[in-house]
Image (tube, helix red, strand yellow):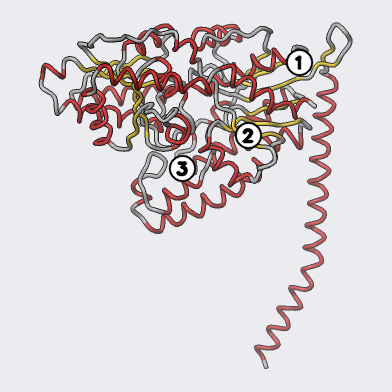
């Protein structure tokens, strides 16, 4: 009887609290709605007060790209500059803005760098909005819960960008999906994105679920069942939120079949997603003349890629070391490994120092070429026998395409874009090779070096013919077609 009375009392207490709690929830929701509406109206007024009128009296659309590292030298930056060049040709009357965190250089220096590295020159001026808080999206700030930290940081960085310039059209070209609802719902913009690599993917969930140690899943977590389960829960919840923010985009472009499959699964955007292969300057590399009938006395293995952890340069050095271990001193002297890439910040520079230390420990001769000019890059590719790529689940692989166009025999990772889109048979003929660990890379390099010059020439020619689908011209046409919806 006493227990029943206690239960009745508890029910009455909860009932008495329900109405006040409901009123409080409704009130807070209403206040939040009023606040967000006020912010939306404030941004609308800012946009209205900053409208640009051309010489004919027409309003100019403001098209903004969110690319905090636009002065880096990677494939993502090449996409940015080619996209701007394409839009400037199609919509000459628009004003183009780039949000960047490269505040230590001028806009002119950024444009000169794009020309020097990518051979891209824009027809019309670009306005750079320099962001002061780019550090908020750098991984060094979040040693734990990195994905969540960087995503929340991107919202704050996006807020800074939106406050400084409210565009009509907003395009995230670097993978900061959490900025999309900010610009759409508060900024009142049409929003689109070009996805190079999903922030989280089902493959990442599988790595944690299978207790596999990788650069983004430390061994102390993969070896601990409890930590692995907690990280899996964290990843699943993050994937749900990521799927929602991505679904806010009015238009979605992805760079490969691999990215398409993952983004489609998470964002549920089948009605507005398209594959737009990134622009590769294939013609510039196709101008390199292939040597025919000439036996090479020395062979260089060249890697192209930013010095980021996921590029797995350590695997390249170890695989090359394994190859050298099978060679005589005379044969070793005829082989060299050249790592070419860009450094975005101090962390990348420290990574290069670590790679140099590793090569010294393994007694492997490695040449490091950091932030080199475009012409020097071409020279190294023209002289190379093998183009090396080792990133697991590379979203696309512009460096892979460039190596193939330049006439090197590509040896890429057996996953992601290289496997599904690039290093595939062309008209039934072999275009390159794939590997996935230290031993298979060393074995594949040995196989390539053992081929006759005639056979290597056939593979080079097949690869060159296959890369026309990744040209600048193909990208520009597909990019314009995909973005038409934003300009209507």
Image point 75% across, 75% down: which residue?
13
Q: Judge by depth and name the residue closer to the eye, 274 or 80.
A: 274
* Callout 3–callout 2 Cβ contact below 8 Å: no
**Residue 441 x %, y %:** 28, 32
Left or right placement of residue 381 versus residue 173 in this view? left
| Secondary-structure class at tag 3 | loop
Q: Residues within 10 Å of mark 2 (few under 14, many from 20)?
A: many
Q: Residues within 10 Å of mark 3 (few under 14, many from 20)?
A: few
**Residue 396 x %, y %:** 48, 30
Q: Which mark is residue 94?
A: 1
Q: Judge by depth and name the residue closer to the eye, 98 or 76.
A: 76
Q: Judge by depth and name the residue closer to the eye, 415 or 190.
A: 415
Residue indicated by mark 2: 274
Left or right placement of residue 425 versus residue 449 in this view? right
Please, is residue 325 above or below residue 104 in the view? below
Sequence-wise, which precedes: disc 1 or disc 2?
1
Front tag of 1 and 2: 2
Q: Quadrant of residue 485?
A: top right
Q: Which mark is residue 458?
A: none
| Secondary-structure class at tag 1 | loop
Q: Which mark is residue 144?
A: 3
Q: Judge by depth and name the residue closer to the eye, 307 or 134.
A: 307
- Residue at the far bottom: name it: 1
Q: Quadrant of residue 98?
A: top right
Q: Residues within 10 Å of mark 1 (few under 14, many from 20)?
A: some
Q: CA distance from mark 1 to mark 2?
A: 24 Å
């Amino acid at each position: 009887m006493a227990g029943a009375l206690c239960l009745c009392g508890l029910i009455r207490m909860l009932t008495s609290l329900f109405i006040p709690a409901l009123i409080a929830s409704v009130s807070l929701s209403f206040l939040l709605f009023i606040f967000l509406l006020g912010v939306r109206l404030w941004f609308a007024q800012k946009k209205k007060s900053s409208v640009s009128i051309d010489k004919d009296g027409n309003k100019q659309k403001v098209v903004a790209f969110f690319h905090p590292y636009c002065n880096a030298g990677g494939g993502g930056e090449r996409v940015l500059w080619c996209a701007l060049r394409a839009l400037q040709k199609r919509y000459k009357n628009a004003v183009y803005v780039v949000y960047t965190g490269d505040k230590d250089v001028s806009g002119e220096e950024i444009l000169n760098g794009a020309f020097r590295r990518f051979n891209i020159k824009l027809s019309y001026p670009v306005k750079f909005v320099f962001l002061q808080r780019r550090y908020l999206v750098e991984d060094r700030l979040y040693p734990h819960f990195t994905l969540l930290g960087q995503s929340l940081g991107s919202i704050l960085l996006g807020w800074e960008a939106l406050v400084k310039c409210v565009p009509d059209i907003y395009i995230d070209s670097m993978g900061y999906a959490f900025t999309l609802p900010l610009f759409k719902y508060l900024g009142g913009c049409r929003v689109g994105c070009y996805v190079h690599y999903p922030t989280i993917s089902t493959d990442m969930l599988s790595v944690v679920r299978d207790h596999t140690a990788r650069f983004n899943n430390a061994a102390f977590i993969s070896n601990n069942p409890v930590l692995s389960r907690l990280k899996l829960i964290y990843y699943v919840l993050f994937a749900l939120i990521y799927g929602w923010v991505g679904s806010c985009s009015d238009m979605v472009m992805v760079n490969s079949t691999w990215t398409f499959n993952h983004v489609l699964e998470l964002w549920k955007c089948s009605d507005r997603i398209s594959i737009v292969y990134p622009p590769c300057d294939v013609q510039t590399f196709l101008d390199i003349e292939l040597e025919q009938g000439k036996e090479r006395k020395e062979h260089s293995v060249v890697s192209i890629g930013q010095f980021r952890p996921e590029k797995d340069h350590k695997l390249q050095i170890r695989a090359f070391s394994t190859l050298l271990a099978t060679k005589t001193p005379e044969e070793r002297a005829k082989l060299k490994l050249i790592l070419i890439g860009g450094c975005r910040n101090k962390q990348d520079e420290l990574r290069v120092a670590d790679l140099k230390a590793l090569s010294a420990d393994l007694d492997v001769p490695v040449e490091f070429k950091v932030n080199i000019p475009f012409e020097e890059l071409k020279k190294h590719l023209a002289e190379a026998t093998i183009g090396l790529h080792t990133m697991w689940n590379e979203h696309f692989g512009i460096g892979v395409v460039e190596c193939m166009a330049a006439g090197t025999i590509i040896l890429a990772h057996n996953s992601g874009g290289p496997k599904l889109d690039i290093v595939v048979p062309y008209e039934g003929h072999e275009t390159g090779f794939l590997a996935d660990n230290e031993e298979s890379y060393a074995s594949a390099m040995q196989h390539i070096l053992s081929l006759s010059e005639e056979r290597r020439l056939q593979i080079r020619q097949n690869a060159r013919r296959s890369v026309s689908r990744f040209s600048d011209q193909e990208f520009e046409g597909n990019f314009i077609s995909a973005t038409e919806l934003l300009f209507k």
